[in-house]
Image (spheres, rainbow, N blue to C red):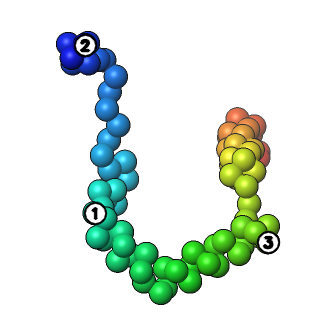
Amino acid sequence: MLDAMKKSTAKPLPRNPVPGITTDISEEELEQIEADPAFQRMMRNAERDIRDGKTIPMEEVIREARARTKRRSRSVHLPGFR
């Protein structure tokens, strides 16, 4: 079984997909961040906004981004449009 695991061809995910942002955080650091009053206030505001429907669903964001990309790519191929 260990040999099969060693022969896996799947590529591992990058540790830090965004340069400059670390994803490795200790429990102590996490507790310190969560204990910060500004962080708690931000989380309360975010929860309230979600409850009140003030946020845009991710599906809508993706749909609008695809439509915008489609409009831009169409305008490149049609002369006279920008």
Q: Which residue is mark 1?
A: 26
Residue at the disc numbered 2: 1
Residue at x 72%, y 67% (from the top left corner): 50
Residue, x 75% and y 51% (percent of image)?
60
Residue at (76% x, 69% y) in the render = 51
Disc 1 element: loop
Mark 3–mark 1 distance (CA, rounded to whole Å): 33 Å
**In the displayed structure image, the side of residue 35 where residue 52 appears, left or right:** right
- Percent position of residue 17, x then y: 37, 48
Question: Residue 8, relative to residue 67: is it above or below?
Answer: above
Neighbour tally class for label 1: few under 14, some 14-19, many 20 plus, Cα within 10 Å: few
Q: How far across and down, in percent of the image, does residue 79 sit?
A: 74, 39
As drawn, 13 above or below 1: below
Taking the view exactly as shown, the residue that stands out farthest to the bottom is 37
- Quarter placement of the N terminus: top left
Is residue 72 shown left or right of residue 27?
Answer: right
Give neighbour class at mark 3: few <14, some 14-19, many 20+ (Cα, 10 Å). Answer: few
* Residue 55 % position (x, y): 73, 65
Read off the residue under disc 3: 52
Residue located farthest toward the right when viewing the structure as drawn? 53
From the viewer's side, name the closer residue of 58 and 82: 58
